Image: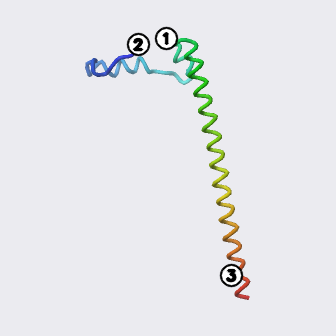
Amino acid sequence: MRYCSIFLKKRNRKKVFSRIYRTDRNSTTSSILATQGVSSKTVSTAVNSITKGMGTAGVNTTKSMVKIETAATTTSEVSIKTAEDKFKTKK
């Protein structure tokens, strides 16, 4: 059951929301949704979507890291090549 903060008195607002949204450290998404009365089909859909999103985020992070590493390596190689060329011209 959800409460709208507009209809709650200020002194009760915090108490009600803390009761609704309180979770302990060992709770999972599925147990929280089940406690709130969500159907098992909706729970599995939500958990699958979250898992898929986390996987996509991980893949995107890895791709970004590879791109950054490639750019850093290229920059380092160019810097070393430039330094070598300057050193050769001074001799």
Amino acid identity at mark 2: Met
Whole-percent x, y for residue 6 in the image: 28, 21
Quarter of the image containing the N terminus? top left
Q: Nearer the viewer, residue 31 or 62?
A: 62
Residue under numbered circle 2: 1
Whole-percent x, y for residue 82 in the image: 68, 75
Residue under numbered circle 1: 37
Whole-percent x, y for residue 89 in the image: 71, 86
Relative to residue 42, is residue 21 drawn left or right? left
First of labels 3, 1 by sequence position: 1
Q: Residue at x 62, y 44 (%)?
A: 61
First of labels 2, 3 by sequence position: 2
Is disc 1 placed on a helix, strand or loop?
loop
Q: Residue at x 71, y 79 (%)?
A: 85
Is disc 2 placed on a helix, strand or loop?
loop
Amino acid identity at mark 1: Gly
The answer to whether the residues at label 3 and label 1 have Cβ atoms under 8 Å apart is no
User: In the rendered view, would you say 43 is above or below 91?
Assistant: above
Circle on res. 86: 3
Amino acid identity at mark 3: Lys
Among the 4 quarters of the image, the one containing residue 30: top right
The answer to whether the residues at label 1 and label 2 have Cβ atoms under 8 Å apart is yes
Q: Which residue is most to the bottom?
A: 91
How many numbered badges does the structure rendering display?
3
Q: Residues within 10 Å of mark 2 (few under 14, many from 20)?
A: few
Whole-percent x, y for residue 78 in the image: 68, 69
First of labels 1, 2 by sequence position: 2
